[in-house]
Image (cartoon, rainbow, N blue to C red):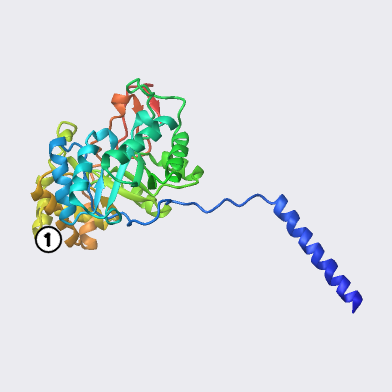
């Protein structure tokens, strides 16, 4: 019996020593990826109010009206230069903070750590909230602070993502994400992220469907936020292509009649049904309410297939030429520069 006890003790000692050795020699297992730091709040609503190009003297009322009319999602950005007025609308609506969603974005000139901290704090202050629900890198392009659109060659998207992760850890935002990235850019971030992107906001609508890109995000668990979901209805886009205005497109007019809905409602319903979050912009009460009607429309599989055939692969928003940068290099309708001109991301 004494021999048996001694043998067991020796065996236990050996096992303990092996465990210690394994812990020392084996590589450390990385902690699980986190996408949220600030507690509470809601998941991103499927429809929100966009504020890009909203007049400063109108956006406060639009935001207040939207929040009081059933919206619970506001999409903003520092570069829109109307976050202070957007914040007035948020405060006037008097909705509990954990009942609505606010997104803002880091501008190109603020990618360096010191500038990024100031930028996110300003957005939080101007919007009048304690924290953001989502903070995005607006473009995968860094400008040298104070030097216009001069490209900051010393700051990579990986550098910027590390800054974003630190912003998330500071609890200034619940989640972080990206905007206007190419697939290669997304892959770069997914390989190195400690806190991975919650969402990617990019242009997608019936004239630029990018279905493979949307599907890719579904596969990797990153939500898609579709800006300009009504295509070329944005006045800024009127001179950028020769496509028929989408609200007058015979295909969509006919489908909307079939659904007993407006063309805008039908297009937005398609956006929701393909699992993208839609953020139509308006400062008019009539259209703010009208756009909510998309929530009541569903499309058949056959109708979805017919819509897929309407893709024009035409991008409306592409500032790459002005920045001398080749954006969207591996996506539909990338930036086209002169031969050997500009930088490729």
Q: In this view, does 29 lie to the left or right of 264?
A: right
301 versus 239 height, above or below: below
Q: Is residue 36 left or right of residue 28?
A: left
Q: Is residue 13 left or right of residue 37?
A: right
Instruction: Label 1: state its secondary structure.
Output: loop
Identity of the residue drawn at 25% across and 55% down: 272
Which quadrant, please, contains the N terminus? bottom right
- Nearer-the-camera pick, 130 or 272: 130
Q: Across the whole image, how many numbered discs are drawn on residues?
A: 1
Q: Residues within 10 Å of mark 1 (few under 14, many from 20)?
A: some
> Disc 1 designates what residue?
259
The answer to which quarter of the image holds residue 326 is: top left
Q: In this view, does 198 lie to the left or right of 257?
A: right
x and y percentages locating residue 330 in the rendered image? 38, 38
Identity of the residue drawn at 47% across and 25% down: 154
Which quadrant, please, contains the C terminus? top left
- Nearer-the-camera pick, 252 or 217: 217
Asked if residue 113 can be seen in this view, the reply is: yes
x and y percentages locating residue 323 in the rendered image? 32, 25
Most distant residue in the bottom direction: 1
332 versus 307 height, above or below: above
138 versus 62 height, above or below: above
x and y percentages locating residue 115 in the rendered image? 39, 30
Identity of the residue drawn at 15% across and 52% down: 291
Most distant residue in the right direction: 3
Asked if residue 332 can be seen in this view, the reply is: no
x and y percentages locating residue 106 in the rendered image? 35, 36
């Amino acid at each position: 019996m004494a021999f048996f006890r001694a043998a067991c003790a020796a065996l236990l000692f050996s096992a303990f020593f092996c465990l210690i050795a394994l812990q020392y020699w084996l590589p450390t297992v990385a902690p699980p990826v986190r996408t949220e730091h600030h507690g509470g709040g809601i998941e991103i609503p499927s429809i929100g109010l966009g504020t890009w190009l909203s007049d400063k003297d109108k956006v406060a009322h639009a935001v207040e009206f939207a929040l009081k009319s059933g919206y619970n999602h506001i999409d903003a950005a520092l570069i829109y230069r109307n976050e202070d007025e957007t914040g007035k609308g948020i405060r006037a609506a008097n909705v509990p903070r954990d009942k609505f969603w606010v997104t803002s974005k880091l501008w190109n000139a603020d990618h360096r750590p010191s500038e990024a901290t100031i930028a996110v704090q300003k957005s939080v202050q101007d919007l009048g909230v304690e924290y953001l629900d989502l903070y995005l890198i607006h473009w995968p392009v860094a400008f040298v602070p104070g030097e216009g659109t001069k490209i900051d060659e010393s700051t990579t998207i990986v550098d910027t993502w590390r800054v974003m992760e630190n912003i998330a850890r500071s609890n200034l935002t619940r989640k972080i994400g990206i905007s206007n990235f190419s697939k290669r850019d997304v892959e770069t971030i997914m390989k190195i992220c400690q806190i991975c992107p919650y969402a990617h906001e990019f242009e997608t609508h019936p004239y630029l469907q990018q279905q493979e890109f949307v599907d890719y995000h579904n596969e990797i668990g990153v939500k898609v936020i579709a800006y300009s979901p009504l295509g070329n209805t944005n006045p800024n886009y009127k001179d950028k292509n020769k496509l028929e205005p989408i609200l007058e497109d015979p295909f969509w007019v006919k489908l909307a009649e079939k659904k007993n809905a407006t063309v805008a409602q039908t297009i937005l319903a398609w956006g929701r049904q393909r699992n993208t979050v839609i953020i139509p912009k308006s400062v008019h009460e009539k259209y703010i309410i009208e756009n909510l009607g998309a929530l009541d429309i569903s499309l058949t599989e056959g109708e979805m297939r017919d819509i897929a055939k309407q893709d024009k692969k035409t991008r409306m928003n592409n500032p790459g030429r002005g920045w001398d940068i080749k954006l969207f290099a591996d996506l539909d309708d990338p930036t086209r520069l002169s031969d050997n001109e500009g930088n490729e991301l």
